[in-house]
Each structure stands twice: as structure tokens, then as C-alpha cells.
């Protein structure tokens, strides 16, 4: 289930592994890569972040992108996707297709508040949707997501739903005039809930990843929470840890 920037990153990683871009050489610039892959420069930049996170390349302003290793930290099996910055999460939202299923105003009860990591009784605008890879009608959905947006932003978000392609956090930024300064993420193992199994084309109770993201505006204010269910065979998450100097 590849987005465009994941495809570009994988193609470049394979080219590096094959020796077409030897260690110590520079990769083509963003404009040339964008033309070669027929994608936008923002897609190329997202792919470069993936390669950098994998340790394959280093990037310096005005010096280009240098190949540092021929494989991704010695991991077999190719390239895996990493969402390690707010910009990467935003790009993921742009690169995948969102198919809205339901929009409703809700009040969080105790169970929902526990899953959200918020307080009971708080009002939210809930947007439920499936996320898919564009241009692949035969592929199963990547995930089911319920996004909860602070009710204070609800009316304006509703009015702009159909014209917005990225994550809803960027829409909240536009409405509020404030930036998202932090995304808090929690990943747990779960089973596919009965209520979304049919839409996801998955067996109820089959293995899945539950991902909760809390979007914090600056100054600190919880503006949005997303709860996503990813069937286990359609999504992987990669994190690279480095020792501090």
C-alpha cells in the first residue's frame, strides 16, 4: 500500500542498493527527481526525509543530498515507511485518498474519552473516513479513522470539508491562525472492531494496529484527536533511534 512519496523513496533506495547511486555521490536535485518520477517537489522532499531517516542519505543546504549507505541500516525486505515529523504526517494525508463515511457532532462518554485520552463530556465534531491508496481500485483500504475536532472549530471545518485534501489539522491551523506544535502518538495492538470490519474488508477481530494521534496547537491546546484502525497486513510503522552524542 504505497503512497507516491513512499514509491519514490523505495525506487531511490533500490537504485542506491544496485549501485546506480554509489556511496559518496550526490543524488539528482529535487527538480530533476520530480520530473523523472512525474511528482511534485513536495513529494520528492517527503521521499528524501524517508531516505534520511533510514540512514541512506544525508542532506545539507546548498550541498545537495549525499548517499551515505547502500542499504537501509542492514534491514532485509526493502524500505519501510516512517512518519517522524509533523510534515511527514501532513504529506501522508495529501498522498492518500480519504473517503468520508460520516460526519456528526458528539459528546465524549467515559469509554470514548478513555480511548481519546481526553475528558468525558467534552464536545467534538467527528469525521469518520476510510483512507486508500489513489489509483488502485482493487486494493483494500489502508485504515478506518475517526477524527475528533474541538467543537469550537466544528462549524468552519464542516463548511470546508469537501475542498480540503490534507489532514484536518492543517485546516484547524488555517481557521485558528495557530500552528500545530506537537503530535502525540500512541500505537497499540487490537482487533478489527465489528462496526468497521465490513468497510475495511477484514475479518472482525482479526489483528490490527490502533493508532491514536493528539494534535496540540501552540500555545498548548488539544484541538484534534484521530483514532485509526489499520488491519495488520496493510500497514507497518518504522522508528529509528539514535544515541545522543
Image: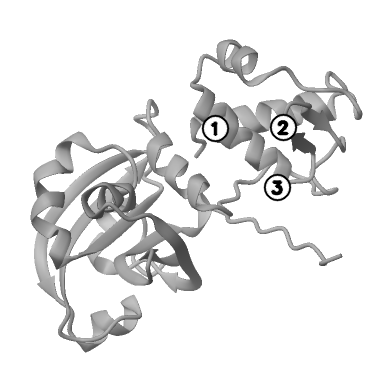
Q: Nearer the viewer, mark 1 or mark 2?
A: 2
Q: Nearer the viewer, mark 3 or mark 1?
A: 3
For label 1, the SS is helix
Q: Quadrant of residue 68?
A: top right
For label 2, the SS is loop
Question: Which one is in front, 181 or 97?
Answer: 181
Depicted 212 relative to depicted 138: above or below: below
Depicted 194 relative to depicted 43: above or below: below
On the image, the x and y values in percent for residue 39 come to: 50, 19
For label 3, the SS is helix
On the image, the x and y values in percent for residue 173 come to: 30, 51
Q: Quadrant of residue 164?
A: top left
Question: Gap in Å between the C-alphas at discs 3 and 1?
Answer: 14 Å
Q: Which residue is mark 1?
A: 5
Q: Which mark is residue 61?
A: 2
Q: Which residue is mark 3?
A: 53
On the image, the x and y values in percent for residue 30 come to: 63, 21
Amino acid at each position: 500500500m504505497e503512497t507516491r512519496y513512499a514509491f519514490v523513496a523505495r525506487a531511490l533506495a533500490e537504485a542506491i542498493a544496485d549501485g546506480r547511486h554509489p556511496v559518496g555521490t550526490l543524488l539528482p536535485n529535487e527538480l530533476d527527481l520530480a520530473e523523472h518520477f512525474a511528482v511534485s517537489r513536495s513529494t520528492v522532499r517527503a521521499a528524501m526525509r524517508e531516505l534520511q531517516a533510514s540512514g541512506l542519505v544525508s542532506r545539507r543546504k546548498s550541498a545537495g543530498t549525499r548517499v551515505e549507505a547502500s542499504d537501509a541500516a542492514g534491514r532485509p525486505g526493502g524500505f519501510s515507511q516512517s512518519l517522524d515529523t509533523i510534515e511527514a504526517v501532513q504529506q501522508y494525508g495529501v498522498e492518500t485518498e480519504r473517503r468520508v463515511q460520516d460526519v456528526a457532532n458528539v459528546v465524549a462518554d467515559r469509554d470514548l474519552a478513555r480511548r481519546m485520552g481526553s475528558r468525558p463530556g467534552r464536545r467534538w465534531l467527528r469525521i469518520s473516513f476510510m483512507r486508500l491508496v489513489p489509483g488502485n481500485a482493487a486494493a483494500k483500504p489502508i485504515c478506518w479513522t475517526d477524527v475528533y475536532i474541538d467543537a469550537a472549530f466544528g462549524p468552519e471545518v464542516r463548511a470546508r470539508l469537501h475542498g480540503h485534501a490534507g489532514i484536518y489539522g492543517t485546516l484547524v491551523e488555517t481557521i485558528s491562525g495557530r500552528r500545530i506544535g506537537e503530535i502525540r502518538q500512541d500505537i497499540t495492538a487490537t482487533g478489527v472492531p465489528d462496526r468497521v470490519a465490513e468497510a475495511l474488508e477484514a475479518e472482525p477481530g482479526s489483528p490490527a494496529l490502533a493508532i491514536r494521534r493528539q494534535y496540540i496547537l501552540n500555545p498548548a491546546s488539544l484541538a484534534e484527536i484521530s483514532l485509526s484502525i489499520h488491519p495488520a497486513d496493510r500497514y507497518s510503522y518504522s522508528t529509528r533511534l539514535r544515541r545522543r552524542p
